[in-house]
Image (cartoon, helix red, strand yellow):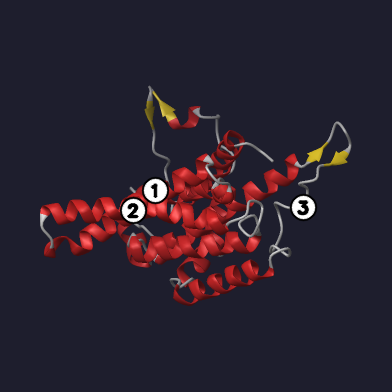
Amino acid sequence: MANFTTHIVTGTIVSGSLATLTLAADVIAPENLVAVTMAGTLGSVLPDIDLKDSRPSRALFAGLAVFFSFAVLFHFAPQLSIVEMWLLWLGTFLFVRYGLHAIFHRYAVHRGIWHSVVAGIFCGLLTASIFYYALGRPDGVAWLGAGFLFIGYLTHLILDEIYAVDIIGNRLKASFGTALKLVDARRPAASILMAASAAALLLIAPATKTFVDGISSRPLWTGLHERLLPKDNWFGAFMEHGQVAASPDARSAITTGSVPQSSEATSTATQ
């Protein structure tokens, strides 16, 4: 299997490449682009959450602890004293970071259900719901974040399978076939539970129409094709005396946070 550094570097490269295409398409606000890119990088290490005491597992549960401790604090803060808020925040943080961490690893098995495509789908749907309901992002952004995370997740699984091939020795390692799989056939109960959880998330996930319409838009792909290579000199066409020169058809700053831009936002940006 690939180590943590390899996964995080490869995941960052893949997410950065996707972010470049998204930026070139000019369909999402910069602050949202940063968020979805981070989701892709997170997805590239997420399958190793079931590896006890691994850096991805510790980092993820620490992040969840911070998120839920503040979410609970802000919800109950108006009814509590300062000391009670301190205790509630600290108690929630410790429970998620250490309590849930211990419970999760009591039942999780490395290279089990979390190293499967269905787990990647579950995490993608969960990401879309968190972006939409918890972070208040538009539905197009929520699904873009889900897509980034899912691609990062698949990158991790594929990379582990590649590392299970011994090219020099011309053989397959014993771990081959355990990383990239649709479900965990060895543990059918866990696979059924994961698939059922993904189906439940699908019922409450945000609408997909904005996202689907955006990525299937013919003008979007035509524009990306036109911008694939520079029309004039490499880099120099955009530089003039050390300053970035705007192209003749350049639009004003991105004002949308969703995918694609609405007709109203587009007309405003071009005025």
The span from disc 2 to disc 3 (Cα, nearest Å) is 35 Å
Q: Secondary structure at mark 3?
A: loop
Quadrant of image for the C terminus? bottom left
The span from disc 2 to disc 1 (Cα, nearest Å) is 6 Å
- Left or right: 251 as drawn, with respect to 102: left
Residue shown at the point (58%, 63%) measured from the top left: 121
* Amino acid identity at mark 2: Phe
Q: Tell me the number on the disc at residue 177.
A: 3
* Residue closest to the eye, 255 or 12: 12
Quadrant of image for the N terminus? top right
User: Label 3: how many residues lie within 10 Å, few (<14), some (14-19) or many (20+)?
Assistant: some
User: Label 2: how many residues lie within 10 Å, few (<14), some (14-19) or many (20+)?
Assistant: some
Between discs 1 and 3, the one toward the N terminus? 1
- Image spot of residue 87 (x, y percent): 21, 53
Query: Label 1 belongs to which residue?
Result: 63
Residue 250 can be seen in this image: no
Q: Secondary structure at mark 2?
A: helix
- Image spot of residue 228 (x, y percent): 59, 43
Q: Are marks 2 and 1 in contact (CB under 8 Å)?
A: yes
Above/below status of 2 relative to 26? above
- Image spot of residue 117 (x, y percent): 65, 60
**Residue farthest to the right, as pictured:** 170
Q: Are marks 2 and 3 in contact (CB under 8 Å)?
A: no
* Residue closest to the eye, 134 or 116: 116
